[in-house]
Image: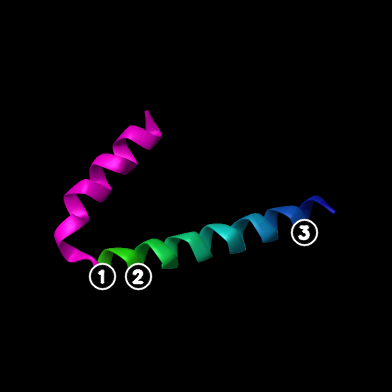
């Protein structure tokens, strides 16, 4: 059961990373804003 949860979590992480990649490639000028958003999110 725990393995299924870990697998689902990994799939969600991969999906979010791909969505972030698409977001960065489609809106290149706002990469700095995105970095600042990530920094504030991690703090």
Instruction: Measure the C-alpha gap from mark 1 to mark 3.
Output: 32 Å
Q: Which comes sooner in the sequence, label 2 or label 3?
A: 3
Q: Residue at x 25, y 46 (%)?
A: 35
- Callouts 2 and 3 close, C-beta under 8 Å: no
Residue 25 is tagged as 1
In this rendering, position of residue 30 left or right of residue 5: left
Q: Residue at x 38, y 36 (%)?
A: 41
Residue mark closest to the camera, 1 vs 3: 1
Q: Nearer the viewer, residue 33 or 14?
A: 33
| Image quadrant assignment for residue 7 | bottom right
Residue 25 vs 33, above or below: the answer is below
**Secondary structure under badge 1?**
helix
- Callouts 1 and 2 close, C-beta under 8 Å: yes
Q: Which comes sooner in the sequence, label 1 or label 3?
A: 3
**Secondary structure under badge 3?**
helix
Instruction: Measure the C-alpha gap from mark 1 to mark 2.
Output: 5 Å
Quadrant (top left, top right, bottom left, bottom right) of the C terminus: top left
> Measured from the top left, where is residue 38 in percent x and y?
33, 42
Residue 4 is tagged as 3
Q: Nearer the viewer, residue 30 or 21?
A: 30
- Callouts 1 and 3 close, C-beta under 8 Å: no
Residue 34 vs 7, above or below: the answer is above
Which residue carries the number 2 mark?
22
**Secondary structure under badge 2?**
helix
In this rendering, position of residue 5 left or right of residue 13: right
Give the residues in magenta.
25-43
Q: Residues within 10 Å of mark 3 (few under 14, many from 20)?
A: few
């Amino acid at each position: 059961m725990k393995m299924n949860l870990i697998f689902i979590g990994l799939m969600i992480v991969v999906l979010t990373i791909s969505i972030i990649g698409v977001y960065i490639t489609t809106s290149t000028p706002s990469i700095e804003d995105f970095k600042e958003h990530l920094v504030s999110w991690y703090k």
